[in-house]
């Protein structure tokens, strides 16, 4: 069976070259006689795999030396609690920016640990833009925002200046899709299942001076300082997910690095948005300057045609185009591994569907 174009928001499409290499190494990794899934996380083989993955990711994002890079479990959702547990530092206040469903979930979780202030919100326009004017309390322990909302397709293309207060970003759905100026952040976290690898792994990049202040009662495995001191192996880490992530990092380097990947992502997104903007049959609700390059939601002129649209797409080798249940419509997630050919096929199909039903 030939490969299809998978537009899923996550778990998402992985580079074919990565999957092929993992397949070749499945029964015997580099002459060890073992699959990576069978290796002890304390053994020489896996320790080397993890070290390579960290080195490559540091290189790709130019991570400064005063930042720790952690490979953790629990997905980005666990970070909704882990961030306030570690970063409040006795201040009791944190500010959040509301731009969609994922930032709403982060706010709800944080309210169990601190006084949450809303620095900015786009709820007034149904989360269809990224507010740039933030009212941050000077005594807030940190400011949290979701830099790319997977469901609504809203992306921040510039980093907002919060004047010395640690900035925390949930970068899950555009991590590794573009260069990232890590030094502007106190902490960045991302679930792996978009641009990095399989579900089960989350990546945290945290500035060293923010470590060591976990609130009383924080479980050991959720204490960033303890995990950093144990090289992310305070307990058994998600070994196979780290291995696949490491292969993805090498693949990104082979493509020319993050800047080259960004150029391709800009090209893919422009192709799809140009079609949406030229059509009266399809609509994208997001402000043009805040459109996501990774997650492109759109609606059809008549929602009754949704089922026919999805059926036709599947017949043409394109799947997972149904929008999130909370917003409906369609959503094309075009992460790093989605080739230009996949977006071209989608655009051609959308033109055909409009000609038939418009």
Image: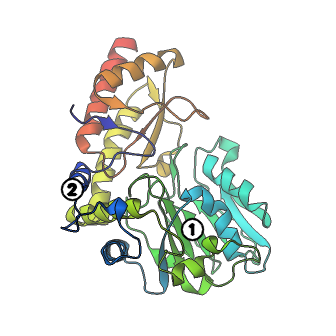
Does dot 2 land on a helix, a strand or a loop?
Answer: helix
Crowd rating for badge 2 (residues with CA inside 10 Å; few <14, some 14–19, many 20+): few
Q: Earlier in the sequence, mark 2 or mark 1?
A: 2
Return the x and y of residue 213 as percentages of the image width and height: 69, 82
Return the x and y of residue 340 as percentages of the image width and height: 25, 43
Q: Residue at coordinates 30% horizontally, 60% vertically from top-left? A: 248
Residue 123 against residue 159 in the figure, above or below = above
Q: Which residue is mark 1?
A: 160
Residue 58 against residue 327 in the figure, above or below = below
Q: Residue at coordinates 47% horizontally, 20% vertically from top-left? A: 306
Residue 30 against residue 293 in the figure, above or below = below
Q: Which residue is mark 2?
A: 21
User: What colour scheme was applied to this rendering of the protein?
Assistant: rainbow
Depth order, front residue of 260/195: 195
Depth order, front residue of 320/158: 320
Residue extending farthest to the top is: 356
């Amino acid at each position: 069976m030939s490969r299809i174009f998978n537009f899923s928001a996550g778990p998402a499409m992985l580079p074919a070259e990565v999957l092929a290499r993992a397949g070749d190494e499945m029964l015997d990794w580099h002459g060890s006689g073992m699959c990576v899934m069978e290796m002890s996380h304390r053994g020489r083989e896996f320790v080397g795999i993890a070290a390579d993955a960290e080195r490559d990711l540091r290189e790709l994002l130019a991570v400064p030396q005063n930042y720790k890079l952690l490979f953790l479990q629990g997905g980005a959702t666990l970070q909704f609690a882990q961030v306030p547990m570690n970063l409040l530092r006795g201040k009791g206040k944190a500010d959040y920016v509301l731009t969609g469903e994922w930032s709403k979930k982060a706010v709800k979780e944080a309210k169990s640990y601190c006084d949450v202030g809303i620095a900015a919100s786009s709820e007034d326009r149904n989360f269809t833009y990224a507010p740039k004017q933030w009212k941050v309390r000077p005594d807030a322990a940190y400011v949290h925002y979701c830099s790319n909302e997977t469901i609504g397709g809203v992306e921040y293309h510039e980093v907002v200046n919060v004047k010395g207060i640690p900035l925390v970003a949930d970068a899950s759905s555009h991590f590794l899709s573009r260069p990232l100026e890590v030094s502007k952040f106190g902490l960045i976290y991302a679930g792996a299942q978009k641009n990095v690898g399989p579900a089960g792994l989350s990546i945290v990049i945290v500035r060293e001076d923010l470590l060591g202040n976990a609130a009383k009662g924080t479980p050991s495995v959720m204490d960033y300082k303890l995990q950093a001191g144990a090289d992310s192996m305070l307990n058994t880490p998600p070994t196979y997910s780290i291995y696949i992530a490491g292969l993805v990092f090498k693949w990104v380097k082979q493509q020319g690095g993050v800047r080259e990947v960004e150029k391709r992502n800009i090209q893919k997104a422009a192709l799809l948005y140009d079609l949406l903007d030229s059509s009266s049959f399809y609509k994208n609700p997001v402000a043009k300057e805040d459109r996501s390059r990774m997650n492109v939601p759109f609606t059809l002129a008549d929602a009754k045609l949704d089922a026919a649209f999805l059926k036709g797409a599947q017949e043409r080798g394109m799947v997972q185009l149904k929008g999130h249940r909370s917003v409906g419509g369609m959503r094309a997630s075009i992460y790093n591994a989605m080739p230009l050919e996949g977006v071209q096929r989608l655009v051609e199909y959308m033109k055909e569907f409009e000609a038939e039903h418009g």
